[in-house]
Amino acid sequence: MRYDFDRTIDRRGTGSTKWDMLTTRFDAAGALPMWVADMDFESPKPVVDALIQRAQHGVYGYTMKPDDYLDAIAGWQKRRHGWQIQTDWISESPGVVSGLSWVVDALTKPGDKILIQPPVYHPFRALVEALERTVVENPLRFDGGRYSMDFDDLRAKAKGCKALILCSPHNPVGRVWTPDELRELGTICLENGVLVLSDEIHADLILPGAHHTPFGSLGEPFARGSVTCIAPSKTFNLAGLATSVVILPDPSLKARYEAHLNRLHVRAGGIFGNLALTVAYREGDEWLDQLLPYLGANRDLVMENLGRGPIKPSTTEGTYLMWLDCRALGMADEPMDQWFRHEAKVVMNAGAMFGTGGSGFMRLNVGCPRSMVADALSQIEAAVGRLRR
Ligand SMILES: Cc1ncc(COP(=O)(O)O)c(C=O)c1O
């Protein structure tokens, strides 16, 4: 079937973080919410149909996973990314951040050093610090348009570190790492006994022209020296169903992770999350194949329009998040955030929250109908025009 991503769906009053917090958190009623990372699109029809059917049953007691849950996950990885995973590598978590927290808690000790590559998704630092581990930064390099990894810096810092949290594809800078980049990072980590925790939540959101390589698919030593977190939540817009997957190819790491979950008595998914994950990974290709060019065209619209003014978007190869270099506006971070919110009436995430290298940037979410992207662009353009007068 053909999906209509141009259709505007009113999410206000549904308990939507993105829309309903415009008033409760930002005091910005009427602004366009282009911040937190979910999309304004309906999920694939097979998923919606399966959830409605299950909801109609009316009995929601303790549950097991659908029979083809594991095969659906493995089939998706193989079909979409060419990575043959074994079903006994698969474990679970309610979300990728909770999964990363549990992995760090289970597999490292307080005081251990953990690498991150800022500017990066802010919970990485927060969870490492909350668990009383020590953050070591390996900042990305920026050439004014595109980001890359600083391998010399990584080589100098990796010794003595226990883990590195990799964001692949990278939120917020939008890079889809190449096999060569991942292999070089992986080799440095293997040589230094650094476990790679690869957050691949955005792996399926690869825009035309790029190609995602799962870290664990680089070969056996890389697979065994890593833990990969994936989820259907970003891909199919299911974040509210709280379900994700932790892939641990090394049996001893998997046993330690699962022992940790058992100790805490925590589990994931629930009836609706498990069902949605299974159906999405089994039948979601058609929807995703239509979504990706749509997101690519949203990105291109932003590149073309903003590219002409003082705000410079960096190359976005994956995710629906665009990283805007706003330093030419000459504002400090907090006033700039307020200015976008109240003058341009577009709510974004302030770059400073992503740590080192984020100051002066804003993160724009284009996972929405094109009309909303176009409105945001004209509102930003008009506000910049007023600023310059
Ligand atoms: C890189 C990355 N990891 C994890 C998450 C959040 O995942 P979850 O809601 O499953 O904890 C996000 C959400 O924006 C993200 O961008």
Image: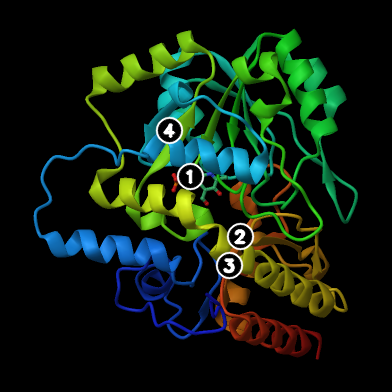
Relative to 111, residue 333 above or below: below
Q: Earlier in the sequence, mark 2 or mark 4?
A: 4
Locate residue 87, reporting x and y percent. Answer: 46, 26
In this picture, residue 343 sits left or right of residue 206: left
Q: Which residue is mark 2?
A: 350
Q: Are marks 1 and 2 in contact (CB under 8 Å)?
A: no
Q: Nearer the viewer, residue 47 or 111?
A: 47
Q: Give whichever of discs 1 and 3 has the lower sequence position.
A: 1
**Up/down of 369 relative to 54, above or below:** below
Nearest to N terminus: mark 1 or mark 2: 1
Report which residue position mark 4 lands on: 99
Of the residues tagged 1 and 4, which is closer to the observer?
1
Q: Which residue is mark 1?
A: 231
Q: Is residue 165 visible?
A: yes
Q: CA distance from mark 3 to mark 4?
A: 26 Å
- Looking at marks 3 and 4 on the same chain, the residue that comes earlier in the sequence is marked by 4
Three-letter amino acid code at the position of disc 3 = Met
Q: Nearer the viewer, residue 31 or 172?
A: 172
In the picture, the disc for residue 348 is 3
Q: Picture quarter containing residue 291? A: bottom right
Q: Amino acid at mark 4?
A: Gly
Q: Say which element carries label 1.
A: loop
CA distance for labels 3 and 2: 6 Å
Q: Between marks 1 and 4, how big is the CA–CA gap?
A: 10 Å
Q: Amino acid at mark 1?
A: Ala
- Is ligand 1 within 8 Å of the beta carbon of the residue shown at mark 1? yes
* Quarter occupied by the C terminus: bottom right
Identify whether 36 is placed above or below 297: above
